[in-house]
Amino acid sequence: MMAPNTHSRVRRGDVLRLIGIGSAAALVTACAQPVTPQAPASAAAQPGATSASAPASTVSVTSQPATEQPKTGGTLEWGLLGNIVTLDGHNYAGTSHIFLTLAKNPNYWHSGLPYVDQLHMPIFSDPQTMVTALESGSLDAAVNVPIRDAARLQQDTGYQVLLNKNSGAMYGIIANTTVEPTAQKAFRQALQYAIDRQRIAETVLLGLGDPTELVWFPTSPAYDVTKNRTYTFDLDKARSLLQQAALSDASIDFNYSTAIAEFGSMAQIIQADLQKIGVTLNLKPTDPPQLAQMQYQVKYPGISAGTPLFGQAHPGVQFGSPYCGPLNNWTGLKNDQFTMLSTAMSTAVDPSKGKQAYAAWNDYVLDQSFVLGIATFLPRMCTTARVHGVHYDLAYILDGTEAWLA
């Protein structure tokens, strides 16, 4: 059950959408009994908290060594980023005390699990508010905190950081191919050359993520290291493409989610570089539900940001992707050639034929440039030192079935 605040609740019969990074990924199947929500506990001082001015450093994996036997009982406070939107369009963004509470299933097939009695998930629309809740002691764990906060907290022995290094996700940009000037392939290719991926990986992601143009991770059979370097940063090439297409003075919007702090910093870097070649990039930080609706309907002007998934899996998974699938993607690009290439990639069984199909698909997507990769996205979870047993599975999902509190 979810409640927007202590005075009004979303009815149990309402159909809800949870929009945000790490939302569905945090649901634990072992906890299947909804209980009546309670107001979050008041903030308490966290002994291990550090100053917000502490220098950031590259984040690395922090393990969760089991120094003692798992303990049962208790409530795990698990913060999520996102918003609640009902199908009638009501948006609860910014409303306090929105959360989901799951109770231990006494009939779970694995006897003795889960260890905790309840999983309480406050839902935050603002990343920094979630970080504050973690440091104040209101949360035990927070999903996908901003990278600089993750780097800072990792220097504190009172916290630990978990990373999914083979998530298959990436920070990306999609272009609306149904409106000008992003309907022009030359303009989209110019954008590719104008993205300084290496700088973004180093200064925004602090090394937590590698520059990428393809949707694939190195573990995918479709990954190609050479093709992944097709559009090296080159403002002269970008300017030349724009001049050839008579688009040197173009102006476009960049719509990105307010729930992903890194996109704001990336947007500023891209904006400054595009300005050098005469293109105006209007930054449009957007509420996640509004952005999702714009993308779903292909109603965003210019370009928008997103996080394509499952680049570590079989390439056929991308056939249904809203970013680069051939049927209902969020860029508006649909044609018989793309459908044919995607079908061949998805159905190839013979390894040699598969390699050819993957290469042809990569060449087409890179040439059309309707999906522009920026860097790999590594999901992360920050927890206090008392949390044990949480891990990522192979499908990007956070599993708290064996979580326990010391």
Image (tube, rainbow, N blue to C red):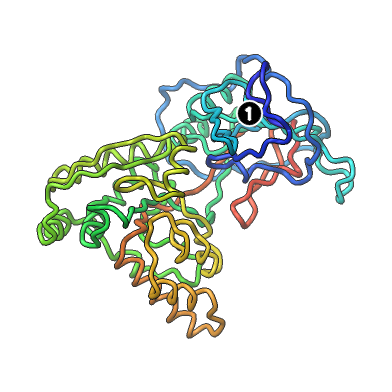
Relative depth, front residue between 215 and 283: 283
At horizontal 67% and vertical 17% (from top left) the residue drawn is 6
Mark 1 neighbour density, 10 Å: few (under 14) some (14–19) many (20 or more): many
Relative depth, front residue between 183 and 209: 183
Instruction: Give the x, y percent position of residue 352.
Output: 48, 85
Instruction: Give the x, y percent position of residue 141.
Output: 62, 32
At horizontal 25% and vertical 62% (from top left) the residue drawn is 185
Image quarter of residue 317: bottom right
Q: Is residue 260 left or right of residue 192?
A: right
At horizontal 60% and vertical 40% (from top left) the residue drawn is 17
Instruction: Give the x, y percent position of residue 271.
Output: 24, 41
Image quarter of residue 32: top right
At horizontal 15% and vertical 60% (from top left) the residue drawn is 241
Relative depth, front residue between 387 and 342: 342
Instruction: Give the x, y percent position of residue 260.
Output: 45, 38
Quadrant of the rendering where the C terminus is positioned = top right
* Residue labelled with disc 1: 122
Q: Is residue 320 left or right of residue 77?
A: left
Quadrant of the rendering where the N terminus is positioned = top right
Local SS, label 1 = strand
Total numbered labels placed on residues in the image: 1
